[in-house]
Image: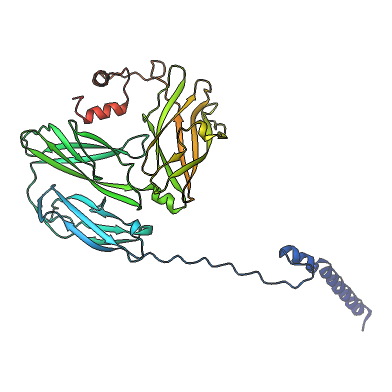
Amino acid sequence: MSTRRRALIVCAVALMAASVALLLRDRPAPVRAVDLAALVPGQQAGAAAQPLPAPRTPARTPAVAPPVFDLVRVEKDEVCEGEENLVAVHAHTTDGNDAFLHYTVAGEAGAQVPVRAFVGRDGKPVQQYAVAFSKDNVATRIELPPYRVKNCRPSRMLVVTMRMLPNSVAEREFTATVQSLDGVPFTPAWYEWNFGDGSLDATADPVATHDYSGLAQKTAFTDLIVKVKALDGGGQSVEGRFPLHIRNVAFDTRRRGMATLFTQPTPRFPAMGPDGVVRQKFRVWHVEDAPVQITGATMSRLFVPEAPGSAPAPPDVAAIDHTSVLRHTELPPGVVREESLEFDFAALPTVYAVTVELQGITSGGTPARGQLTILRPQPRPTRENSVPIEDPAMILKIRRAMAILKQDTVSQEDLSRLEREGKLQ
């Protein structure tokens, strides 16, 4: 072998040895037992690695069965277009969820709904449905029984509307509006009201307010039918109905192991005295079968931001002696207690609200919670903080409302109520 060839072989062997050395140097060191212990908590160094336990499979909630209709009753076999036809429905559940049942009839919530039907372009009334809902809104839908819709219209209709009153828990305001369709004037002299819970009333105005705080709330929802009859004193009358669908808050909180203490300020809007103190009365009640003992209270003061757009300071929260602010420490079932609170907003101008959280317990051991809130009233309107009204008709309406109510100021709610009562015409 020549000398040159022998030198090339020696160089190739040297390069291979160098490559092997580099590979051995860059290989990562083997993972030690201590590293395994760090990766698997509770594993001791040197111990054999154990597989992690499989995650628990959550228990499957039994499927809710759809409700079964027992009754779909239509009041009339034939009606004119736009005439009320009361439809009543009832269903049951096969898995014990009757307390969650609620309904819609022709798109309106309620177990009794005054349905109005109209003929479509094809000369036939639009098909309408009733839907029964159980727990988790599992539903069953059926068609309403057919009835004839004639090509006529009633001489007059009474339409009832409803609204929740602001700063109120259970008060609802109903308004009755008579529509004369035959051109013959009809001027009601009085209105007779049936609020669906056994309460009756008669008013000279087409507006009535009713308090539903006495409902038992044993089910998720309460469905009532409100009826009103307008009479002109000469033998003529017209009736209207409204399906009232109420969600029962106490039923929902009771399912979560809590009793609700309801509170409502009276009057609904606070007034500040000349000394800067707001003195507010409250109605306090519950709908449990057992009495509730008040055991404690916490007061929170809420602050306005120091500058527009900035975050307010955290609320100032402190435990207080509930006997120092409450006249009653026991709330019997079915009894409404009256409490009075006051707060000096003039002394603390940065506070806009004060909340007293009530803690209690029923005789059966269920925790009870409620809340009393005093709000700083809005400043009285002045030329400096208000936008002047320039519409002559609105100015006349406001002055008329001030004269009727004998007040030096009126709110938009005052104007709306007087307009619904027809006193600003």
* Outermost residue to the top: 383
* Outermost residue to the right: 3
Task: Give 228 or 16, whichever is nearer the viewer.
Answer: 228
User: What colour-coding does the image apply?
Assistant: rainbow
Residue appearing at x 94%, y 79% in the figure: 3
Residue 398 coordinates in the image, percent (x, y)? 27, 20
Asked which quadrant contains residue 31, the reply is bottom right
Task: Give 201 or 361, whichever is nearer the viewer.
Answer: 361
Which quadrant does the N terminus fall into?
bottom right
- 220 with respect to 180 (left or right): right
Which quadrant does the C terminus fall into?
top left
Residue 406 coordinates in the image, percent (x, y)? 27, 18
Asked which quadrant contains residue 50, the reply is bottom right
Residue 309 coordinates in the image, percent (x, y)? 52, 30
Residue appearing at x 21%, y 24% in the figure: 424
- 155 with respect to 96 (left or right): left
Residue appearing at x 23%, y 28% in the figure: 419
- 342 with respect to 89 (left or right): right
Task: Give 406 or 284, whichever is nearer the viewer.
Answer: 284
Q: Number of numbered discs present?
A: 0
Residue 72 coordinates in the image, percent (x, y)? 20, 59
- 324 with respect to 407 (left or right): right
Residue appearing at x 6%, y 36% in the figure: 183
* Outermost residue to the bottom: 1
